[in-house]
Amino acid sequence: MQDKHRISLNAIRVFAITARTGSLTAAGTELGVTSGAVSHQLRKLEDELGVTFFQRGNNTVTLTEVGRRFYQEVAPAIGLLERSADALYRNENEISVHATTSLALRWLIPSLDRFRALCPQVRVRVETSSARAFSGVSDADISIRHFRPGTETEAWEFLARDLRRPVMSTNLHTGTESTLPNLPALQCCIGNWDWKDWCATYDIPLSSLTFGHEFDTDDAALHACVAGLGMVLAPTILTGREIRSGALLALAGYEPVETGTYRYKRRSESRAVRQFCGWMDGEMRGLE
């Protein structure tokens, strides 16, 4: 059997770019090589196939009839290969992260500039849902969620402890009157399970608290807290900005109590996903 011609795919790509641009110099610029290197590739391809693809002028080239037919046939295939390669590159450098709304708004999004500084080529798409609507199954590359004590966490990697403490607005602080029974409490968890756990730790009757407004997310409750509507049992990782600025104060005499953990699961093991997970771990260690 006669051997088939072994034609370089790279040479065909050089041909297609030259045909499209109509210039050896322009083709060389797009390919990152000299016009002489482009001319050499084209001559070799023509010799191997026994045809003439171009009529050459002063740094310009014009397709012959054979060259025109060949370009019409190979251009769609070259375009498909380039689009597939571009899509693969985008997929490898774009990740989706699913997190609860409060965690995304108060920690993840404000911290993303530091991740961008470390990995400027990676694009992050953030998806959010409330803790009550959070599904254990997500199409996101990385899912981050809160787990209450005693909840099954198999296959979820540890990210941080959920440490909570009562916080209040400086507008609500009135010196000696700012004691637990004298402050209205805000509810943001179903059945007040967080306040129940916290009160049990300090042996405080839940009935000694007076509950006012109710909210469906930590973020909404914290906005109400800053506005002076009451105190919130808030995760420390969600209140750093307000504590540093003085907009919120921690109620004196009470240390943070662990009321669960934040954990994440990854659906992909791409380089960008590994970089993001490593960055998250480092960020959380810095908050300890």
Image (cartoon, rainbow, N blue to C red):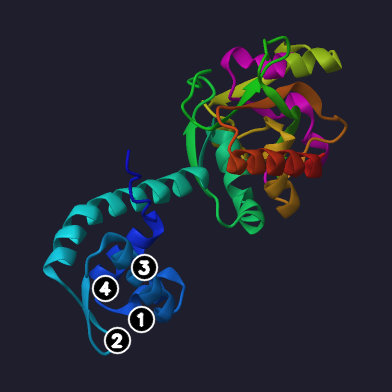
Element under label 4? helix
Q: Position of residue 275 (x, y in %)?
A: 66, 44
Residue 10 or residue 26, whichever sits in front: 10
Q: Is residue 1 left or right of residue 133?
A: left
Placement of 103 over or under 7, stated as above or below? above
Tag 1: amino acid: Thr
Q: Residue 21, which numbered label?
A: 4
**Mark 4 or mark 2, which has the lower sequence index?**
4
Placement of 100 over or under 238, stated as above or below? above
Q: Which residue lies furthest to the front in this view?
A: 1
Tag 2: amino acid: Asn
Residue annotated with mark 2: 59
Q: Residue furthest right?
A: 253
Residue annotated with mark 1: 25
Q: What stretch is highlighted in magenta?
A: 170-196
Q: Residue 44, which numbered label?
A: 3
